[in-house]
Image (cartoon, rainbow, N blue to C red):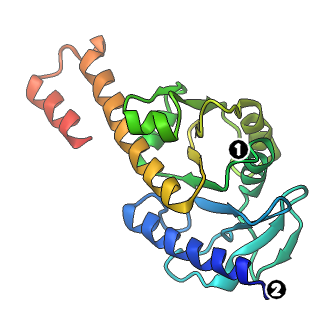
């Protein structure tokens, strides 16, 4: 499919994927990215493809309404349904990013909403990140669980035991938001360690080392 807008989106997505991989937020073939092309189409990263070897034509062009692929050389990410749901229920969202970033993923294991503390985070993400109940990756069960949690008050969601999904208006803002969320997750985990009564007998030096590691 020769379309200047699609080609521009593909090139921008490749650049964003490299940045996210360098940050450790897209590791190996884990995580995925989607960009809205228009009201009907979106571009998504392919399944099981290393981000450092990905080519523009590998990025898949799908119909948002039914995930039918209209262009691309590989199979689309198995999480395409999550991105399509985000774009359908939040029409202002232009980018949907699913990461396996370390600290936010750790928070997802706790099954709790994450309050956002920073002013910048509140501006671009919202006052909190919602937790999405567990369902196997790439399944319709996870898509349904995610759809139930989508609201206008937040642009980020923790997938229980899985990672993070973040929406944004631009690729640059999506990257900035997940970086912010990693800092928010670090603060959240540090606070829980400091206040956890079950760790009261842990030597202070060991506790300090654990907190500093975050």
Residue 85 spot, x, y in % from top left: 78, 46
Secondary structure at badge 1 equals: loop
Report the label total.
2
Camera-near label (1 vs 2) is 2
Q: Which corner quadrant of the image does residue 9 belong to? A: bottom right
Residue 131 shown left or right of residue 82 in the figure: left
**In the picture shown, does residue 33 fall above or below 151?**
below
Return the disc, 1 or 2, that comes first in the chain's sequence. Answer: 2
Residue most toward the left? Answer: 205
- Residue occupying image coordinates x 76% and y 31%: 148
**In the picture shown, does residue 111 fall above or below 100?**
above
- Residue occupying image coordinates x 27% and y 40%: 214
**In the picture shown, does residue 109 fall above or below 33?**
above
The residue nearer to you, when weighing 15 against 25, is 15
Residue 120 spot, x, y in % from top left: 40, 39
Q: Which corner quadrant of the image does residue 171 belong to? A: bottom right
Q: Is residue 83 visible?
A: yes
Residue 30 spot, x, y in % from top left: 55, 61
Residue 74 shown left or right of residue 160 in the figure: right
Residue 93 spot, x, y in % from top left: 68, 49
Label 2: few (<14), some (14–19) or many (≥20) C-alpha neighbours in 10 Å: few
Secondary structure at badge 2 equals: loop
Label ID, residue 136: 1
Can you identify the residue that label 2 sits on? 1
The residue nearer to you, when weighing 3 against 165, is 3
């Amino acid at each position: 499919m020769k379309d200047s807008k699609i080609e521009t989106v593909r090139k921008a997505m490749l650049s964003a994927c490299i940045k996210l991989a360098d940050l450790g937020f897209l590791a190996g073939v884990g995580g995925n990215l989607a960009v809205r092309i228009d009201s009907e189409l979106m571009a998504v990263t392919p399944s099981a493809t290393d981000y450092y070897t990905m080519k523009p034509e590998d990025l898949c062009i799908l119909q948002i309404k039914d995930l039918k692929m209209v262009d691309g050389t590989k199979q689309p990410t198995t999480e395409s349904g999550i991105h399509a749901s985000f774009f359908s229920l939040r029409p202002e969202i232009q980018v949907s990013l699913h990461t396996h970033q370390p600290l936010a993923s750790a928070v997802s294991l706790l099954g709790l909403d994450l309050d956002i503390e920073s002013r910048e985070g509140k501006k671009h993400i919202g006052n909190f990140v919602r937790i999405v109940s567990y369902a196997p990756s790439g399944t319709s069960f996870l898509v349904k669980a995610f759809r139930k949690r989508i609201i206008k008050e937040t642009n980020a969601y923790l997938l229980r035991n899985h990672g993070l999904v973040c929406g944004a208006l631009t690729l640059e803002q999506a990257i900035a938001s997940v970086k912010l969320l990693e800092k928010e997750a670090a603060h959240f985990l540090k606070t829980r360690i400091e206040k956890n009564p079950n760790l009261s007998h842990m030597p202070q030096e060991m506790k300090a080392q654990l907190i500093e590691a975050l």
